[in-house]
Amino acid sequence: MTNYGLTWTDPDGVPRAAAVSYGESSGEDRAKQLVAAKCKNVELTEIEVGQLPRPKAV
């Protein structure tokens, strides 16, 4: 199974990253929820097992 991580910028401008890994379909669902919550720069990226995504600086 491929693991995916999410990064985004919340509506207040704070860069965030998920502390969990997702499967592709659950990651896409979560990304849609974040976009609906007015988050920007939502990215679903492939990650290695045990790796966590890092939020990007704004």
Image: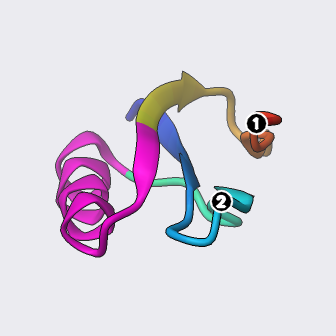
Q: Which mark is residue 45?
A: none
| Disc 1: which residue | 58
Q: Main secondary structure of the magenta part?
A: helix
- Residue most toward the front? 12
On the rendered structure, is 46 left or right of 23? right
Q: Residue at 22% x, 48% y: name it.
A: 28
Q: Is residue 45 magenta?
A: no
Could you say which quadrant of the image residue 32 lies in? bottom left
Q: Are marks 1 and 2 in contact (CB under 8 Å)?
A: yes
How much space separates mark 1 and mark 2, taking CA atoms?
8 Å
Q: Is residue 46 above or below residue 20?
A: above
Would residue 24 be found to the left or right of residue 32 on screen?
A: right
In the rendered image, residue 58, in percent from the top left (x then y), is placed at 76, 36
What residue is drawn where x is 72% and y is 40%?
A: 53
Residue 40 magenta-highlighted: yes
* Residue kind at label 1, given as amino acid type: Val
Neighbours of disc 2 within 10 Å: few (<14), some (14-19), many (20+): few
Residue at 34% x, 48% y is 23
Location of the N terminus (image quadrant): top left
Displayed quadrant of residue 34? bottom left
Q: Is residue 55 left or right of residue 43?
A: right
Q: Which residue is mark 2?
A: 13
| Front residue (pair 26, 6) | 6
Crowding at dot 1, Cα within 10 Å, few <14 / some 14-19 / many 20+, comes out as few
Return the disc, 1 or 2, that comes first in the chain's sequence: 2
Q: Is residue 18 above or below residue 37?
A: above
Q: Which residues are magenta?
A: 23-42
Q: Secondary structure at mark 2?
A: loop
Give, as a three-letter code, the residue at label 2. Answer: Gly
